Every structure is written in C-alpha cells, then in structure tokens.
Image (cartoon, rainbow, N blue to C red):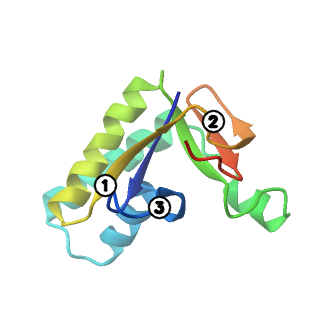
Amino acid sequence: MFVRFVVGTDAENFAWLNGIFTEAKFLSRREELFKYELDQLNSTFDWFNDHLPCPPFLSKLETGEWTREAVAWYRAEATHHIRRMWDIAAILRENGINVRLVTSEKPGKLVYEDEFQIVAETPQWS
C-alpha cells in the first residue's frame, strides 16, 4: 500500500492535484501565515530534509527520463514520515486549504524508490 497527500476536494480528480509540499511552499511564499505557523512549517521541512531522500525530479524531467506525471508516494511502513505530513496538512487546513489522503496498491510505473517512498508515473489510480 502507498500513501499520498494531495490538495483538493473529494470531487476533484486527485491525479491532477498538487502534493502538500508544493502547496505549503506556495502558502509560505504568500506571506499570509502567522509566525508560529511559518516556524512550524520550516521546522517540519527541516525534519524532512534530514530524514527523507529527495528524488531527482528536476534532473529526470530535464533529461526526459521522467514525465510530469511522476509523483511521490510514501510506503505505508513510513509511519514517522506520514505522521509528520499531518503537521503540514494541519497548517494547510487551518488556512482554508483542503487536504486529502489518497492510497493505492498500484500507483503507476515505478521510476524511483528508497526505503520510505517511491516515485511512480503514468498513474493507474485505484
């Protein structure tokens, strides 16, 4: 089982929705957060920078090895990472942004994996 956090409502096709890292970056750049929210968000980003490998999205997109449909999914066993994602989700929700948790057994063609996550493209949404 794989897990992904996206921004949008249940009525929207989650295959086309941004992940919450992207949306949180957008929100922080709009300078609308309270200081404590921005501090919490930055602390959470720092934790992820220290505890989660960063898939090579930019370089793989530039070389054409990956398509824009390549998205990251957590392995269900990555419980510490998933728990920390809820910290980001809470800040987004407090600021009126809908967050959804999506699960899939077959998120698509595997193009990257590490201990905590995969990147899959050409999603086969279940």
Neighbor class of circle 1 (other Cα within 10 Å; few <14, some 14-19, many 20+) is many
Q: Position of residue 114 (x, y in %)?
A: 65, 30
Q: Where is residue 94 in the image (x, y as percent from the top left)?
A: 15, 59
Between 56 and 90, the one lying in front of the other is 90
Give me the C-alpha separation between circle 2 and circle 3. Answer: 16 Å
For marks 2 and 1, the one nearer the N-term is: 1
Question: Which secondary structure lies at badge 2?
Answer: loop
Between 112 and 55, the one lying in front of the other is 112
Quadrant for the C terminus in the image? top right
Neighbor class of circle 3 (other Cα within 10 Å; few <14, some 14-19, many 20+) is few
Q: Which amino acid does label 3 sit on?
A: Asn
Residue 99 image label:
1
Residue 13 image label:
3
For marks 1 and 3, the one nearer the N-term is: 3
Q: Mark 2 points at which residue?
A: 106
Give me the C-alpha separation between circle 2 and circle 1. Answer: 21 Å
Q: Residue at x 85, y 63 (%)?
A: 63
